[in-house]
Amino acid sequence: MSKKNNNGQKPTKEFVFQKKNYLFLFIGIAFIVLGFILMSGGGSDDPQVFNPEIYNFRRIRLAPTLILIGLGIQVYAILLNPHKKNKE
């Protein structure tokens, strides 16, 4: 985005995202990656043998919850406006 100076000089170019946005983006990515890592595994070497380990708490509840939290953090990071001034 460009901002005009009060003196009528050339507009200065500025990035839309700032350091705070990128910090939240990386935190969200870490949550998503951790969720997918926790979801992996639990399979069986023999397809004829059932392995009940695939339905444990970690794969059914924890990992998808971490992924959804990570996606929520991503949305927050995109919508965060670091230029907004606090009203006090």
Image (spheres, rainbow, N blue to C red):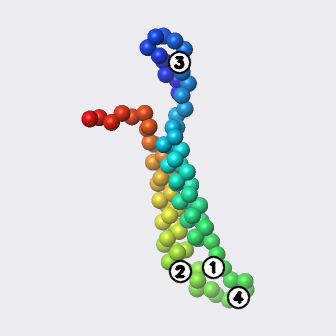
User: Tag 1: residue type?
Assistant: Gly
Q: Residues within 10 Å of mark 4 (few under 14, many from 20)?
A: few
In the picture, which quadrant includes the C terminus? top left
- Real-space Cα separation, disc 4 to disc 1, in angstroms: 14 Å
* 3 or 1: mark nearer the eye: 3
Q: Amino acid at mark 3?
A: Pro
**Residue at x 47%, y 53% (from the top left corner):** 73
Residue to which mark 2 is pinned: 56
Residue topped by disc 4: 48
What residue sits right under mark 1 in the picture? 42
Gap in angstroms between the C-alphas marked 1 and 2? 9 Å
What's the amino acid at mark 4?
Gln
Q: What distance separates the C-alpha of mark 3 from that of mark 1? A: 57 Å
| Label 3 secondary element | loop
Nearest to viewer (mark 4 / mark 3) = 3
Disc 3: which residue: 11
Q: Position of residue 29 (x, y in %)?
A: 56, 55
Circle 4: element type: loop
CB contact under 8 Å: marks 2 and 4: no
